[in-house]
């Protein structure tokens, strides 16, 4: 089975998406889940979304995309982080 591809996005593609990306990578490594990923700003979604199986966002995604979009704000705040990490892991296993 091919590796899933995850796109991490935030408003600038630099700050909050980096924090979330690192936490998701760590969680998935601990659970034996391997995936490919990229990190961009949210405005790049229309041009590249079709290349990804999952989008993990720390900002609102106002674009229509085929891939599921998971709100990662709980990973930043810590409130509900485990539930979101589990949701991401399940999406990557599917």
Image (cartoon, helix red, strand yellow):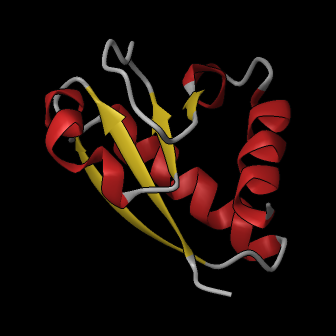
Q: Position of residue 62 (x, y in %)?
A: 32, 12
Q: Quadrant of residue 37?
A: bottom left
Residue drawn at point x = 39 percent, y = 45 percent: 8
Name the residue located 84 percent from the left edge and 71 percent from the top edge. Answer: 31
Foreground: 84 or 61?
A: 61
Residue 30 image point, x, y percent:
80, 73
Image check: 11 left or right of 55? left
How many marks are shown on the rendered structure? 0
Left or right of 83 on screen, residue 73: left
Image quarter hosting the C terminus: bottom right
Spot occupied by residue 85 in the image (x, y as percentages of width and height): 75, 43
- In the image, taking residue 41 as reference, residue 89 lies left or right, namely right
Asked if residue 38 is positioned above or below residue 16 in the image, the reply reads below
- Residue 83's place in the image compared with 50, above or below, is above
Residue 43 lies left or right of residue 39; in this view the side is left
Please state, as top left, top right, bottom left or bottom right, where the N terminus lies in the image.
bottom right
Which picture quadrant has residue 43? top left
Residue 14 drawn at (x, y percent): 21, 41
- Residue situated furthest bottom in the rendering: 1
Q: Residue at horizontal 57%, vertical 80%?
A: 3
């Amino acid at each position: 089975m091919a590796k899933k591809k995850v796109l991490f996005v935030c408003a600038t593609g630099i700050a909050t998406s980096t924090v979330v990306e690192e936490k998701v990578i760590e969680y998935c490594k601990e659970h034996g889940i391997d995936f490919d990923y990229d990190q961009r700003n949210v405005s790049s979604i229309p041009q590249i979304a079709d290349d990804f199986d999952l989008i993990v966002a720390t900002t609102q995604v106002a674009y229509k995309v085929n891939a599921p979009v998971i709100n990662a704000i709980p990973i930043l705040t810590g409130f509900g982080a485990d539930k979101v990490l589990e949701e991401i892991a399940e999406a990557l296993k599917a």
